[in-house]
Image: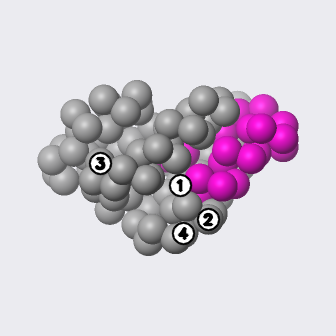
């Protein structure tokens, strides 16, 4: 069942500016200002490598987590890019996302794709 107060952000764009000034900024502020009850950022593709290698992004992820943002990464991407453990060390959930994403789309969940 669709959760009206849960936003998922599918983050696939590994551009540093997009990461800082859209994904991290919106996700964090959405929790701090109570725009949504729950925000989950789905780390998919090249973003997994960006997060594992960039200290500034890692700090932004930690700040977002402190605000209540949940992060979950695609396990297939993480494994193929060799960054699964780094993402787990940051406190991210690392799971297969194909089926949950399909279900989210079919149920009309709130999904922002970046």
Question: How crowded is the residue under tag 2: few (<14 C-alpha within 10 Å), some, or many (20+)?
Answer: few
Comes first in the chain, label 1 or label 2: 1
Relative vertical location of residue 15 with respect to residue 104 in this rendering, above or below: below
- Image position of 26 (left or right of 54): right
Secondary element type, mark 2: helix
Indicate which disc residue 49 carries: none
Q: Is residue 68 magenta?
A: no
Question: How crowded is the residue under tag 3: few (<14 C-alpha within 10 Å), some, or many (20+)?
Answer: many
Is mark 3 in CB contact (under 8 Å) with mark 4? no
Query: Would residue 8 be seen by someone viewing this image from the given angle?
Result: yes
Indicate which disc residue 10 carries: 1
**How is the rendered protein coloured?**
one colour
Find the distance from the CA under tag 4 to the CA under tag 2. Answer: 5 Å
Query: Would residue 106 be seen by someone viewing this image from the given angle?
Result: no
Indicate which disc residue 21 carries: 2
Secondary element type, mark 3: helix
Secondary element type, mark 4: helix
Find the distance from the CA under tag 1 to the CA under tag 2. Answer: 15 Å
Residue 89 percent location from the top left of the image: 30, 29
Give the residues in magenta: 23-43
Q: Is residue 36 magenta?
A: yes
Relative vertical location of residue 40 with respect to residue 52 in this rendering, above or below: above
Q: Name the residue under label 3.
A: 52
Indicate which disc residue 18 carries: 4
Find the distance from the CA under tag 3 to the CA under tag 2. Answer: 18 Å
Comes first in the chain, label 3 or label 2: 2
Residue 107 percent location from the top left of the image: 67, 44
- Image position of 34 (left or right of 76): right
* Closer-to-camera residue (82/21): 21
Residue 95 percent location from the top left of the image: 35, 34
């Amino acid at each position: 069942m669709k959760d009206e107060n849960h936003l998922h952000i599918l983050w696939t764009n590994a551009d540093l500016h997009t990461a800082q000034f859209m994904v991290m900024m919106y996700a964090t502020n959405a929790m701090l200002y109570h725009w949504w009850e729950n925000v989950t950022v789905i780390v998919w593709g090249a973003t997994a490598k960006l997060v594992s290698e960039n200290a500034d992004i890692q700090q932004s992820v930690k700040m977002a987590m402190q605000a209540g943002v949940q992060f979950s990464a695609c396990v297939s991407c993480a494994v193929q890019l060799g960054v699964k453990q780094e993402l787990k060390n940051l406190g991210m959930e690392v799971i297969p996302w194909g089926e949950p994403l399909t279900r989210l789309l079919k149920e009309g969940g709130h999904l922002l794709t970046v």
